[in-house]
Image (tube, helix red, strand yellow):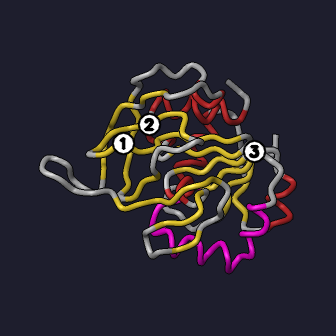
């Protein structure tokens, strides 16, 4: 199986690659559209700001590649946010593969932003991504922006407000949490995406 990690400049690329190696998959890191189109599975990792990440994807001319991709695509953390139409973070248009806008999370008494740490997933509909993952399983989050609950939401999480933690529509999927830092839950989600569970 050919798995490609999109070279989006995210700081989590190395840890995602290592998590895939633990599953027996040696993913190729690439910013080349031809290499990405030939992959069996594509992963868009991301840590940082939406505007900078979209600027990098445009500089590499990867927006048309990702928008027209006919392979399963998984966005991780910021990579998931980039799948949506737009983000309040820098007021930037994103890939538009999923409907909705990513919004800044609101701080409140007892609610610190960014949201950092372990939190519970609440499954809202069945998805092959979550096969073998118990409802109320915990995953590790680090983010200050989040996608609202929408038609693509398969699992939600609450931190002040409820937001999309896992999304999927057809072959387009995303995890707001970091599977590479979420122990068995994260490994299972990655294995399900790759079809090696």
Residue 112 falls left or right of residue 98: left
Separation of residues labelled 2 and 1 (CA atoms)? 7 Å
Please state which of residues 3 and 145 is positioned toward the viewer in this rendering: 145
Prevailing secondary structure of the magenta residues: helix
Give the residue drawn at x 62%, y 28%: 127
Q: Quadrant of the N terminus?
A: top right
Residue under circle 2?
A: 156
- Please provide the residue range marked out in magenta: 45-67
- Going from N to C along the chain, the mark reached first, 3 or 2, is 3
Marks 3 and 1: CB-CB under 8 Å? no
Image location (x, y in percent) of residue 13:
56, 56
Residue under circle 1?
A: 162
Element type where label 2 sits in the image: strand
Residue under circle 3?
A: 72
Name above or below for residue 126 compared with residue 97: above
Separation of residues labelled 3 and 1 (CA atoms)? 26 Å
Image location (x, y in percent) of residue 2:
81, 45
**Residue at the far bottom in the pictured view:** 59
Eye-nearest disc, 3 or 1: 1
Residue 54 falls left or right of residue 103: right
Give the residue drawn at x 69%, y 59%: 29
Name above or below for residue 92 compared with residue 189: below
Image location (x, y in percent) of residue 10:
53, 63
Element type where label 3 sits in the image: loop
Give the residue drawn at x 80%, y 56%: 69
- Going from N to C along the chain, the mark reached first, 3 or 1, is 3
Marks 2 and 1: CB-CB under 8 Å? yes
């Amino acid at each position: 199986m050919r798995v490609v990690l999109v070279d989006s400049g995210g700081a989590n690329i190395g840890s995602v690659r290592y998590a895939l190696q633990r599953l027996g998959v040696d993913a190729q890191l690439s910013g080349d559209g031809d290499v990405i189109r030939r992959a069996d599975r594509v992963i868009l990792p991301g840590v940082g700001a939406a505007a900078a990440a979209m600027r990098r994807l445009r500089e590499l001319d990867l927006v048309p590649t990702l928008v027209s991709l006919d392979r399963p695509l998984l966005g991780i953390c910021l990579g998931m946010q980039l799948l949506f139409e737009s983000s309040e973070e820098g007021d930037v248009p994103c890939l538009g593969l999923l409907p909705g806008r990513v919004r800044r999370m609101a701080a409140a008494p007892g609610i610190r932003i960014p949201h950092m740490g372990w939190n519970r997933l609440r499954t809202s509909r069945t998805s092959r991504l979550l096969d073998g993952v118990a409802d109320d399983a915990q995953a590790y989050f680090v983010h200050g922006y989040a996608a609202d609950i929408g038609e693509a939401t398969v699992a939600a999480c609450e931190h002040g407000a409820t937001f999309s933690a896992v999304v999927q529509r057809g072959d387009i999927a995303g995890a707001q949490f970091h599977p590479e830092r979420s122990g068995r839950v994260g490994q299972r989600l990655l294995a399900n995406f790759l079809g090696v569970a």
